[in-house]
Structures are given as C-alpha cells and as structure tokens.
Amino acid sequence: LNLVPFRGEIVGIDALSRTLFGKAPHGLDEREAAVAAALVRAPNARAALVAQRACGVLREMHRPAPVDCDALDLFTTAALQRRAFEASEGIAPHFARQLMRQVSSTATGQGAGQGALPGPLRSTLSAPLQRVAVQSLTQHLRELRGRNVEDGAIVVLDNGTGEVLAWVGSSGAMSQAGEVDGVLALRQPGSTLKPFLYGQAFAEKRLTAASLIEDSPAHIPTAGGLYIPQNYDRQFKGWVSARTALAASLNVPAVRTLVMVSPDAFFTQLRALGLPLRESGGYYGYSLALGSAEVPLLDLANAYRALAIGGLASGVAPLQTATAVRTAGRRQAAPASDAANAALAPRRVLDAGAAFIVGDVLSDGNARARTFGTDSVLATRFWSAVKTGTSKDMRDNWAVGWSQRYTVGVWVGNASGAAMHDVSGTSGAAPIWSEVMGWLHRATPSRAPRAPQGLVQAAVRFGTQGGQDGWLESARQEWFLPGTQQHLFAVDAVAFGAGEPSATGTTAPPRGTAAQSQVAAMPGERAAAARILGPAPGTIVALDPDIPPERQRLQFVAAAGAGAALRWRLDGKVVAQGARWAWLPWPGRHRMELIDARGQVLDTVQVEVRGAGVRAGQP
C-alpha cells in the first residue's frame, strides 16, 4: 500500500490520506477508509464511481445494516475535489494568489491573470506572525470541532500604513472548503457594526458617551411587520448610558440609536468606511444596527483601523506598495497606478473626537463587564479596544479590535454557511484574537491614544432608576465633543399612556420605572381585568447567538387586581405563577395563556422564537 500510485503524483496510502483527509491513515474513519480502498482499484475514476465502490465496501462491513450512499456520494465528491496545499505554496497561499491576481491585473489592465509579472515580489507579510496566526487558528478550531466549526480566517493590519501583516484565509486541510478565502468572503458581521453606529451618533451630537438610552421593549413598525429587538440575556436594563450600551453590546439601545441616525445615513457612513454593502439603508432597515448586511473580514478590519487612526480611512496595502522588482541588483517599489494611489490616500470619514471616544468605550473593561464579566478573554494586559459579533443562527463569529500599532480581525464559522453549536463571541473568535494580539505585544507596549485637541473630559453623575434606590450608573470621568458636555444625566419623568409611543414606536414603559408599576391603575385602563402586558400578541423574537442561550429569557408581565392568583400556561402546560415570569425560550411558535386559580383563561398571546436555543430542564 505504501507504493500504490493514486491521483496525480500521490504515491502510497499515507500520502493519499494526508492529501484528501488531512490525517494519517490510522486516523481515518470508516467512511474515509472506504473511499481510500475504492481508489486503490481505480485511482482516477469519476467521483460517482468511487462513491459507488466505497458504498459497496461499507455494505460488506455493515451487513445487514443500511448505508446512506447518497451522503457518501457528496462526501466523496468533496474529498476528491480537495487537495492539500503543497509545501511550495508556503504559509500564506490565499494571500499569494490574491497578490498574483492583483499584480497581474495591474500590469495589463485587462483583468486578473492576463499579464506578465513584473519580476520577484516582496509582500508586507511578516512570516513569524503569519505562522503564529496559522497555528492559533488551527489549534482553536480543533478545540471547537465538537461544536460544528471547521473554518476561520485572520487578518492583521498595520495601523499607520495599512500594510497587511498576516492573512490566513482558511484552516487548510481541516476544512471541507480550504480553497475558499475567508478574508475576502462576504459574511454577516453581527454586532461588530455597532461601533460605527455610535461613532456616527457621537459625531452628529445626537448622543454622548454618557447619554441615557432606554433599554426597554421596543416594537418598531416596518414594512415586514413589527421589528422587536432583544438583548443578549433577554433582560431589559432600564436606562443605560451609551458607553454601557456599546461596551456591553446591548441590542435594543443600538436599534434605538439607529432610529435617531436613520438606516440610510448609517448605510452611507458604512460605505464611506469602505464596507461594500450591496443594497440600501432602506433594504436592510433597523436590523442594520445588528449586522444584517454582508461584509468581508478584510474590509471590516480596515474600517476598524479607521477608528484606530482617528477616523481616517484608506485602502489596505498588501499589493501595490508591497510589490517590488529588481533592477540592476537593487530592489525598488513597483509603480502603483493612479487609482491605487488614490485608494491608499487617507480621507476623513469620522470626526477624530468621536473615533477616540468609541475606542475609549471599547477598551473599558468596567463598561464591558455588564455582559462579558470582569475576567473576560477580551481583557488584555496592554491597551486594546475590541468588539465581538455573532450573526443570525450562529453562522458567523467575529472578534475585531486594535491596539496602538495593529488591527486584528478574526472570523470563525463554516464556509458552507452551516450553523455552529453554542459558539459565542467570547468562545469562538475572541480567544484567537487575544492570542494573536498578545503575541504582537509580547515585547512591544501598547499605550492608550492621546485625546484629540478640543475634546473635553468632565465629571458626570447619574440619577436614580425610576425612583428606586441606587444610581443608574456610578459617577465617573467622561469624554465629550466640544459643546456637548454636562454633569448630570437623569430621567426627570417617564410618561406612559395608550397611544403615547417612545422614540422607537413602543408603547411599553421602561422596565423598573415608576410608570410601569402604576400601569394597571391608570385611568381608562381595565384595572380589574387581568391581562398580559407584554410581550405583545404576535411578537417575533430572535435569539441573540452572541449570548449563551441558557441566559436568554423573555419577560412575561401581567396586570391584575390586588390579590389575584395568576398562573402561566405555556403550550398547554402550567409553568409558573405570579404576575411576572422570565421564560427561557426555545425556537418555535408558542401559545402563552394567563389563567386564574380555577384554570379559566384570562388572556392569551402567541409568540414566535427564531434562532438557536437550548431547552433547559426547568422552564
């Protein structure tokens, strides 16, 4: 078997195993071994014939148990299309191919691959960093294999020059799609777009980092029905500052902020940052605040680099400025086209003060602790600012952030688009981001940036939450754009009544406020009739994949006369009692009934839960 010739120049079962399956022969499972055995007789046969023979092998092994030959056909086709990257391709095959395509295209002006190369090329990649990035990605993806994760990508940029220092396009042999370049693939970015939204709101002086945003149920009318964003933990926190909302990645305040800014204006801002959004602000709607558009990792990381350098955007430079030719024994930079020079020229896309404040927020471990805790993998021993994100149904997982010198972007998921199993921002991409960033600063300090001229720092304090004991947030020093500073942030009064919506169209009061506690006794309301105050009938909620599902709860709230004995019945089963219940949801359509002690139905709502969820042992 060690001398059996296989496809191409592959000789021996060991070479075949490592080329097609990325492992030694002793590690092959039954399906892989059957395909290898089928190839011995006809190494160059069509995939369908190889699959047919492999199926016969498995049937002989498993008589009389059935064998799924259709699935084996797909598996065999994918395996035979795959090839391991040869040693000559080095440690950055995806980057090398992109470099060759662009240099060739630039040389001819006729499209990729049409012209002769100008000579030897010298890229901006750092070989030691590239090896560390490849190793980190491979190691962490192995740890996540049990959660249906097999692909990932990493890009590292120099903040000052835009040079690409590392470009890992895939996990290589670990992936069923190792040839796909994850650095350039379009994927949904999740919460990683929030920093740009808040930065725009700061720059337009709609908000400050200390401004209070209402974190309460929001029912926003759209063309497709009500849009009802939910937070990571399914809890509503009342009034929070913009600093807390961004650092803790709260979804409802982000959507309320987009209502202020408008989807069209935010879309324009994202395009200015270099994100290649295909549609329009109106097409994405308010879900754009939560990353419903698709962007490549390279462009997303470069947009974060714009935040790192004070709101200046420019193109990355892995190609034109990285190419070199040898003339008379000397290396000189290859001439770049006028278009390339224009792309690399910095341009102002965000106020420098607003960019600084966003970075200050994303580096604030105390503000982040509300969601991620104080001992998070996002915390580094040096100054850094970072944001995680996870797309719908856990299909994409991100960690993007910067230090004084570098911007690092990491994507984890599946090139096929398959959902991961219970992988959050802090368990998927963030450990890789932390490891790569830590290696970059193993001997190099990273200091917090200096505040731009004119930015004001002032002491601020906060009022109480709806008359309750304790302050909304602790007093602190806060940064302000000139003319926006103030010292006290409080909610003077909260009015609530039928037909009196908040800024986002919701008629529900902030949770925990005095207005809510009095809602059942307000004039004109049926105070004596027990009913469900929230959620509204027909509510559609989407589980946030950035949060562990077991921590996500949907609040059911009822109003009734004093002393009323209320019970909650979910899908025909009594699950709780009292006027309030926090339900751990799972996907599907559900019917919630409010009943009295005799089992009489007092009110009913139907809700639909979308996304991945974990059904706990207790409701």
Image: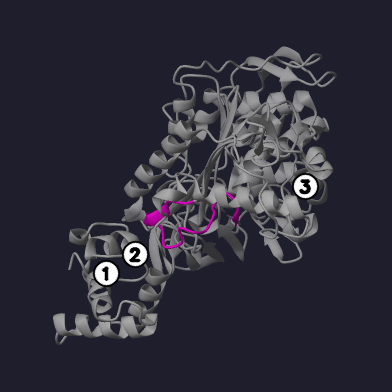
Q: For the point 35% across and 71% down, which residue is it?
A: 7
Residue 128 included in the magenta stretch of the image: no
Q: Residue at x 52, y 24 (%)?
A: 365
The answer to whether residue 252 of the structure is visible from this angle is no
- The tag earlier along the polypeptide, 3 or 2, is 2
Q: Amino acid at mark 3?
A: Arg
Residue 269 position (above or below residue 29): above
Mark 3, residues whose alpha carbon is within 10 Å: few (<14), some, or many (≥20)?
A: some
Q: CA distance from mark 1 to mark 3?
A: 46 Å
Most foreground residue, 19 or 387? 19
Q: Residue at x 42, y 35 (%)?
A: 132
Measuring from the top left, give residue 609's x and y in whole percent: 52, 62
Quadrant location of residue 58? bottom left
Q: Earlier in the sequence, mark 1 or mark 2?
A: 2
Q: Label 2: which residue? A: 20
- Residue 330 found in image quarter: top right
The overriding secondary structure of the stretch rendered in magenta is loop
1 and 2 marks in contact (CB < 8 Å): yes
Q: If you read the primary sequence from the N terminus, does the residue marked by circle 1 or circle 3 appear first?
A: 1
Using the image as rendered, state which of residue 25 and residue 206 is in the foreground.
25
The answer to which image quadrant residue 604 occupies is bottom right
**Which region of the structure is painted magenta?**
170-188
Q: Is residue 134 visible?
A: yes
Report the quarter where the N terminus lies. Answer: bottom left
Q: Which residue is mark 1?
A: 32
Vertical order, 321 against 5 (above or below): above
Q: Dot 3 corresponds to which residue?
A: 271
Q: Nearer the viewer, residue 541 or 579?
A: 541
Helix, strand or loop at label 1? It is: helix
Mark 2 lies on a secondary structure that is helix
Q: Amino acid at mark 1?
A: Glu
- The total number of labels drawn is 3
